Image (cartoon, grey):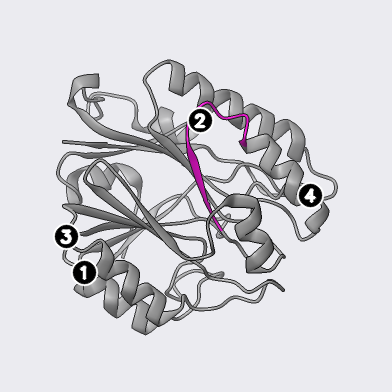
Amino acid sequence: MQHDRRQFLKLALTGAIWIGAGSTLKACAGKEFILPSADGVKLRVAIASDGHYGQPQTAFKENHEEMVAWLNAEKAGRGVDFAFINGDLFHNDISFLEQAKKNWDSLTMPYYVSHGNHDMTDEVNWTKTWNNSWDYGFEKKDVGFVVLNTADEKGTYVSPDVDKTRELLKQYEKHKQLFVFMHITPMKWTNGGIDAPRIVDMFDKQANLKAVFHGHDHDQDNFKEKNGRYYFFDSHVAGSWEPLIADTGYSK
């Protein structure tokens, strides 16, 4: 089932908000959408994806600089606890990996990344660059976050590793809330999705899982629901598709 983001305010997480920028923000701004006070927000996270740093015939450098400036302004203004860049940080050519990292290192907040299908490098090099492997977890306050890999080093779509996923979900099962980041959605409900029924089954059974966030599908600006689990398609920084910007805030 597909919904737009405003519907999520009525249907999904108690106390959670999804805020888009640009046209999405204008659509949400109004009587039905009120930001919580700063002291009512537990954790504020900015999410973007698909920078495609180095893609030919695109304004990738300018778009990245604009995104970093916007995020740093948000940090200085309403505040951001951390940013997450959800895959496709560079575009195929490994020579752009260090330049992409240098760009995101300009953020004034902590940030984390996931591996995308256009991030064509092996896991050893990826881990050396970003200080995290393709599959990992972390926590902020009492909220757990799990990051899963959905592509190999050649860009082939793959299901997240079942054993690693099970281990990570178990590691964070005692947290009050859990969120998952994975570049490609585990259901073939978009053109770019993959079928990963064992992963979806684990998500269905994870009681504290509140939402799963994806990049990858540049034609998606929405969220979908299956068995009470919510799957968001986050913003795109650059590439030869229309850039979108979005962030989330999680309130008490």
Q: Earlier in the sequence, mark 3 or mark 4?
A: 4
In this rendering, is residue 133 above or below 85? Answer: below
Q: Secondary structure at mark 2?
A: loop
Q: Quadrant of residue 116?
A: bottom right
Q: Name the residue: 46% across, 78% down.
A: 161
> Relative to 209, is 245 on the left or the right?
right
Q: Residues within 10 Å of mark 3 (few under 14, many from 20)?
A: some
Q: Position of residue 78 (x, y in %)?
A: 36, 19
Q: Name the residue that disc number 3 marks.
A: 174
What segment is highlighted magenta in the picture?
A: 105-114
Q: Earlier in the sequence, mark 2 or mark 4?
A: 2
Between circles 3 and 4, the one closer to the viewer is 3
Q: Name the residue that disc number 2 marks.
A: 22
Q: Give the alpha-carbon distance from disc 1 to disc 3, as whole Å.
A: 10 Å
Between circles 1 and 2, the one closer to the viewer is 1
- The amino acid pointed to by label 3 is Lys
Q: Earlier in the sequence, mark 1 or mark 3?
A: 3
Between circles 1 and 3, the one closer to the viewer is 3
The dot on residue 96 is 4
> Relative to 82, is 40 on the left or the right?
left
In this rendering, is residue 171 above or below 79? Answer: below
Q: Name the residue: 31% across, 65% down.
A: 1
In this rendering, is residue 159 above or below 231? Answer: below
Q: Secondary structure at mark 1?
A: loop
Q: Of helix, strand and loop, which mostly describes the magenta segment? A: loop
Q: Give the alpha-carbon distance from disc 2 to disc 3, as whole Å.
A: 37 Å
Q: In the image as oriented, which residue stretches furthest toward the bottom?
A: 198
- The amino acid pointed to by label 4 is Phe
Q: Name the residue that disc number 1 marks.
A: 206
